[in-house]
Structures are given as structure tokens and as C-alpha cells.
Amino acid sequence: MDRTVIAYVIYLLVSIALTIWVARTLSRNGRIFLADVLHGNEQLAEAVNHLLVVGFYLVNLGFVALYLSGDGTIDDTREIFEALSTKLGVVLLVLGVMHLGNVYVLNRIRRRGVLEREQVPPVAPQGWVPPTARA
């Protein structure tokens, strides 16, 4: 078997496994955060969590597929490791950037929700006072 094909197979297996592991970890640990962001609405939090995971898979697996093509043929074992380290390093960086982007957006949404909750008066208004005429 050609060494380039071996490198491709290893790259795909490791990249897909890493993507699945990161997506599951983010999904499992993000539920609590989403529930807080969405004011305790568990069903909405679960739906948003699922949509985020699907988007995460689509973007990352699409990137893995696009980044599969190589620069040339691999002639020895050392070049397999060099090609894999470069490709997997870039995939890990993309996974990290995607994670940080998700956390940033969700944190902005959470902050907005906290500000809205703080603007609600602690006691409901009990009456209305008409404006006084100034002389």
C-alpha cells in the first residue's frame, strides 16, 4: 500500500475521532451553560445544543475533508509523521477556534440575558402617579 494512502487513512481516522470526541464533550458540558443562557428552558437548551453539535460536525468534518489533499507523495515513514503532524495540528487549531467562537457567542447571549434580568424591578409597580403641573 502506498505511504500517502496510509497517511490519509490515519489522518481521517484521527481527525474524525477527535471531532466526535470534542463535539460530545462540548455537547455534554454545554447543556448546563445553555440552560442558564436560555433562562432555564431545558427543551430549548437541548434543541439549541443539538443544532450547535450538528453545525460543529458539518464545519469540522467539511474542513477535514477539504484539507485531506496532500502536497505530494510520501516516500518514507518520517514524511508520514511530518504530514500527519501538520494536518492534525491544523485540525486541532480549527477545533479550538470553533470551540472558542461558540463560547464567545453564547457568553454574549448570556450577558445580554443577565442585563435584561437586572433591569426588571424587584417589585411590580403598584400604581400610577399623574404628572404634576409646574407653575
Image (cartoon, rainbow, N blue to C red):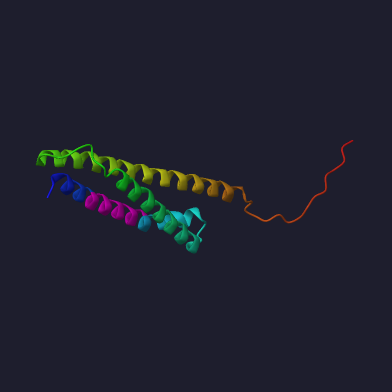
Q: Is residue 41 magenta?
A: no
Q: Nearer the viewer, residue 39 or 64?
A: 64
Residue 112 appears left or right of 85 = right
What residue is rendered at 80% in x and 50% in y? Answer: 129
Quadrant housing the C terminus: top right
Where residue 127 appears, x then y in whole percent?
76, 55
State the image coordinates of residue 132 (x, y, percent, origin top left): 85, 43
Q: Which residues are magenta?
A: 12-26
For the stretch drawn in magenta, the main secondary structure is helix
| Residue at the farthest bottom position | 43
Along the viewing direction, whichever of 36 and 89 lies nearer the viewer? 89
Would residue 68 be found to the left or right of residue 113 on screen? left
Q: Residue furthest right?
A: 135
Q: Is residue 108 above or below residue 37?
A: above
Q: Which quadrant would residue 124 be assigned to in this image? A: bottom right
Figure label count: 0
Q: Quadrant of residue 134?
A: top right
| Position of residue 57 measured from the top left corner of the image (x, y, whole percent) | 36, 53
**Residue 108, position as x, y percentages in the image:** 49, 44
Q: Residue at x 32, y 44 (%)?
A: 66
Quarter of image, res 93: top left
Does the magenta run of residues contain 17? yes
- Is residue 132 shown above or below 52? above
Residue at image position (35%, 48%) is 62
